[in-house]
Amino acid sequence: SLIIRMAEAAAGVENDIKLLIEGFKRLGKPGPEGKLQVTFGELFKDEVLEQQLESLVGSLKAAKKRKILTFEGQMLLQGAHDNVLIKLCE
């Protein structure tokens, strides 16, 4: 049913965000205010995340919407946004 598919999709998004945060903690370094940060390029080139996540950009957008991560702009594209800093909000 539609409700089951929606619940499965939501669970998938939550799992992807969990994997993204694990990758973030592995790759990130403390920024000036002590919060972990990493560039989009570093996340994009990470082989572990590449294999684990269906869509890095989709997972980043979902995490930003939930105020778990923050970054400038709406959409990040490889190449054009490799130097954009992504920061963990917690």
Image (spheres, rainbow, N blue to C red):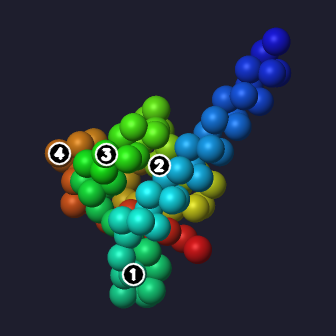
Real-space Cα distance between discs 1 and 2? 19 Å
Of circles 4 and 3, the one toward us is 3
Name which of mark 1 and mark 2 comes first in the sequence: 1
Whether 63 is drawn above or below 11: the answer is: below
Of circles 3 and 2, the one toward us is 3
Name which of mark 2 and mark 4 comes first in the sequence: 2
Crowdedness near tag 4: few (<14), some (14–19) or many (≥20) residues, C-alpha within 10 Å:
few
Whether 47 is drawn above or below 21: the answer is: above
Of circles 4 and 1, the one toward us is 1
In the picture, measured across the screen, residue 85 lies left or right of residue 3, that is left
Query: Which mark, by number, is residue 79?
Result: 4
Q: Which amino acid does label 4 sit on?
A: Gly
Q: Regarding mark 4 in the picture, which secondary structure is present there?
A: loop
List the residue tagged with mark 1. Answer: 30
The answer to whether the residues at label 3 and label 1 have Cβ atoms under 8 Å apart is no
**Residue 40: where, in percent of width, then height?**
30, 55
* Residue located 53% across and 50% down the image: 19
The answer to whether the residues at label 4 and label 3 have Cβ atoms under 8 Å apart is no
Real-space Cα distance between discs 3 and 1? 22 Å
The answer to whether the residues at label 2 and label 4 have Cβ atoms under 8 Å apart is no
Of circles 3 and 1, the one toward us is 3
Name which of mark 3 and mark 2 comes first in the sequence: 3
List the residue tagged with mark 2. Answer: 60
Name which of mark 4 and mark 3 comes first in the sequence: 3
- Does residue 69 appear anywhere in the picture? yes
Real-space Cα distance between discs 4 and 3? 17 Å
List the residue tagged with mark 3. Answer: 47
Q: Which amino acid does label 2 sit on?
A: Leu
Q: What residue type is labelled 1?
A: Pro
